Image (cartoon, rainbow, N blue to C red):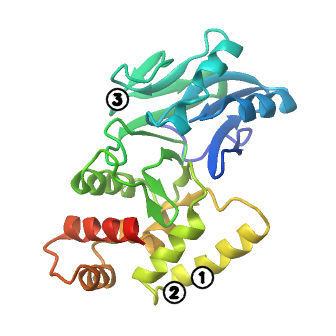
Amino acid sequence: MTSETLPSNIAVHPIPAFTDNYIWCLHDDANAIVVDPGDAEPVLAFIKAKGLTLSAVLITHHHRDHTGGIAKLVSAVPDLPVIGPRGNHIRGITKSVSQGDTVSLPVLKLSLQVMEVPGHTLDHIAFFGHGALFCGDTLFSAGCGRLFEGSPEQMHHSLNKLKRLPDSTKVYCTHEYTQANVKFALTVEPNNVALNEYADWVVSMREQNLPTLPSNLREQKKINPFLRAHELSVKTAAEAYCENNLADDVAVFAAVRRWKDEF
């Protein structure tokens, strides 16, 4: 069993990439591990500036904005471990992992559990340990990933799997989508007090060009409509949107996801 928080000497730093990606870098001022490096350049620049040694790469799914930097990082750091989903479809992965596997990262004294969370893509995985969840494009703050490959049933199941983690779990997703997500969430639940308070905080953070991440699961359960399909307020709003009675939580989730796609 891993400790409930990251060791005090470990920092988790968001390296901005493209227009709204974060490449998460875990480091102890000597060694570094990065998650979903879509672009190698900002990673190499950060590591050089901090005097770090890149020790491993974690990959959550195959989309190019999460994998595009692998080749250049591997060429810069020979024998670099690259850990990601099984299937042999992501070039550069040196170790494939699946549900229930443990990823040991001894250089930072970390141990992460692998969770399969299909929905956004079929190969999507998340890494959880020490109270931190690196969930790629599955769960966002106040949102979730589009269903490019998976079904609403799969994504709802995956999100429920993440919901069962401790409330204190910090959620490190890979896009700064929070402000747009909150705008939609307020359309679904305009009277959600926690969501309205969170919306004000998000505006103030983004006005200062500061990240709104990580979030935590306790907060997300209060504000994220995709984690709240069981709530009457979300069900009522979804039924009004699709002008139909919705039989169960999966149907509610599917309607809200479709609504967001068209928003």
Q: Residue at x 58, y 31 (%)?
A: 110
* Residue type pointed to by label 3: Ser
Report the residue marked by disc 3.
Answer: 98
Q: Residues within 10 Å of mark 2 (few under 14, many from 20)?
A: few
**Pointer 2 or 3: first along the chain:** 3
Q: Residue 225 vs residue 218: left or right?
A: left
Relative height, residue 24 to residue 52 (above, below): below
Label 2 element class = helix
Q: Between residues 205 and 71, which one lies in front from this camera angle? A: 71
**Image marks 1 and 2: residues in contact by CB distance under 8 Å:** yes
Relative height, residue 222 to residue 189 (above, below): above
Report the residue marked by disc 1.
Answer: 197
* Residue type pointed to by label 1: Glu
CA separation in Å, label 1 and label 2: 6 Å
Give residue 9's position: percent from left, percent from top: 74, 38
Report the residue marked by disc 2.
Answer: 193
Q: Residues within 10 Å of mark 3 (few under 14, many from 20)?
A: some
* Residue type pointed to by label 2: Val
Quarter assignment of residue 210: bottom right
CA separation in Å, label 2 and label 3: 38 Å
The image's mark for residue 5 is none
CA separation in Å, label 1 and label 3: 38 Å
Give residue 1's position: percent from left, percent from top: 45, 37
